[in-house]
Image (spheres, helix red, strand yellow):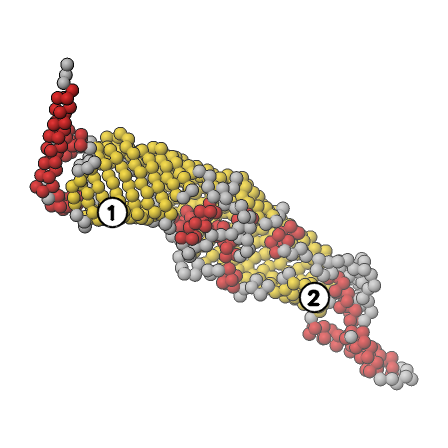
Amino acid sequence: MVNVKKLLKWLATGLLTVATLFSVAIIYVTFAVDINSFRSDIESMARQQGLDLTIEGDLAWTFLPQPGISIGHVGFSDQNIVSGTLDKLTLSVAWTDLLAISGDPSQLTSGSVQVSGGQMRYQAHNSLPVQLDNIDLRVRNVALDGSEFPLAASAQAFGGQQFAVETDVSVQVVNSTIDRINLSDLSIEVNEIKVTGNIEASSQMNFIQGNLQTNRFNLAQQLQLVSKLLPTMSAPKFANPSALRELSIESRFAIDQQALSDISTVMVLDNQSFDINLSIDQQRNKLITKISGDSLNVADYMSETSSEADNSALFAPLAIPFALWQGQSQVEINIGKILLDGFAVDNFYSNIFGNQRVLRITSLNADLFGGQINAIAKLDMRLANPSLSLQPSVNNIDLALALPALADYSGLSGTIELEANIQGAGNDIDSILKSLNGAGQLYIESPSYQDINIEQTFCDAAALFGSGGRSSQQWAAGTKLEDFTGDFQFGDGNLTITDFSTATGNLNINGRGTLGMLSQKYNFKTKARLDGATTSSTGCSVNKRLHNREIPFICKGRFNQGSTSCKPDERVLKELLKNSALEKLGSKLLKNNNSEDQADPLKSLFNDFLKRNLN
């Protein structure tokens, strides 16, 4: 039988001998080989691989748990998109691999990498920069033959948010060049957001494909966290407190640096699904983004304060492709229904092109208020004071539906058509409104104006000229008019309507008016001409002196404040009254010359005139 005691003694002696030999080897290597003398060689070898490496700290041997090299304070850059510094970098290999080689280090098939502390900056062409701080990286059994090895990393990113990655990596190197990289079972976590998927890069990193998907997370909560870390950013408050509570994204992509790239994404926002497709032509430096969806409830995402400045952020996501991509960009949007506060826009479509900070809307179409809107536009942001031009077209819009929803005003109804060519410049709504200039045409079919009865106003004015005019009848509220036509132009913050014409009954109405877009005031100068003896079949009879004669009126007021003030023009009216008074004076003088009554005709005439017209 084997003597167990002798066997254990032999084994202990053997292990002690091996440990002693390893200790002697470690001591010899440590003192006999000055590893810092290889600093310049390491930096030179890195440059040959296209990597600028600067070693500012010391190099030291490590032996436990694996043999390797520890390097302090390393700076690196690929002279293109990646740069940064590492506080401590440790490279090691397994003892078994080290003992198996026959003196040629190139025979090493695997190793491990550990990074403690540092920062890295990544900025690809046509993209915003990403910076990682406090990097911690662990990679074990790194191999370059295509076999998998685990990677775990953490860092701070996105304004101090904790960032973590876990994945299995495989790398295939051909002729000292990375030919393929696979990231399988990828998991990325930023706070409560978790991204999972798989990524494969091949053809020397020129082709990347894969899929990524997120969990369903609370975007509003994430924005609040970011706003705490970035004092200049405030978390939005929406009209619907439940807005942005649920968001998930699923994306598939195939990116080819030498040809066309496609990224297909499905985004579900608060149970609203949208397809977002990106097509990238690298050779032509062109990005095409297509967004489509069945419905979007924009009213939920309006600011609860109803501030125009806050609500402008609603359109910020549409600017992302133009901000991230410095070449030619195109955004095509197709939404079946957009819900706003009190009304809906159907069949919304827009096509926008961008190049060198110039945006062109080549098509904007939508159905709303029973009609359609169409527009083309250009926005030039190359100067400090951006300029815009707009050519809108409005067809068959029902004013009885549009005005209450858009302007909280219900005094005007009819069907409107409009064509215009407008230019302007500015950085805010007030400066843009003040700078607007341009012109257009306006047509309203079967308008009805509820704030005033124009026929009654004319009859009251006609009563100043003697017989006729005033009527004891009960006038209907408002005025039904015949089709309204007119031209308009912009200037000095005002919208001026020129050469408009319409009619009601036997009254033909024309004139011009000004609407102050900044002052919120309006002033219309109109002329009413009577064609006939009465204003209408049920209206008042009018002194023949006013037949086929224009009576001027001035209508003015402030938007959404009280009723309209509409009165005859006093200056012109005085001339008409003066002529009327002289005619009546002549008649009375002629009558009194044939009478024995010598009463003063002037006194009688003007007493009567003052009592009737000026009280």
Which percent across, then down, holds residue 462?
77, 68
Q: Quadrant of residue 447?
A: bottom right
Rendered residue at 18%/30% (across/down): 96
Q: Is residue 530 above or below residue 63?
A: below
State which tag comes first along the sequence, 1 or 2: 1
Tags 1 and 2 touching, CB below 8 Å: no
Rendered residue at 53%/45% (across/down): 242
Which residue sits furthest left? 32
Q: Is residue 544 visible?
A: no
Is residue 207 shown left or right of residue 74? right
Quadrant of the snapshot with the C terminus: bottom right
Which percent across, then down, holds residue 285?
35, 45
**Dot 1: few (<14), some (14–19), or many (≥20) neighbours within 10 Å?**
many
- Label 1 to label 2, Cα distance in Å? 79 Å
Which percent across, then down, holds residue 54?
19, 48
In this view, the residue in front, 331 or 422, is: 331
Kindly identify the amino acid type of the residue bearing the numbered disc 1.
Leu
Rendered residue at 59%/50% (across/down): 341
Which percent across, then down, holds residue 279?
40, 40
Kindly identify the amino acid type of the residue bearing the numbered disc 2.
Cys
Q: Which residue bears the numbered disc 2?
A: 566
Label at residue 86 = 1
In this view, the residue in front, 512 or 90, is: 90
Is residue 165 shown left or right of residue 246? left
Q: Is residue 518 above or below residue 590?
A: above
Q: Is residue 470 above or below residue 294?
A: below
Q: Is residue 85 visible?
A: yes
Rendered residue at 87%/79% (across/down): 591
> Element type at marker 2?
strand
> Element type at marker 1?
strand
Q: Quadrant of residue 574?
A: bottom right
Is residue 149 shown left or right of residue 94? right
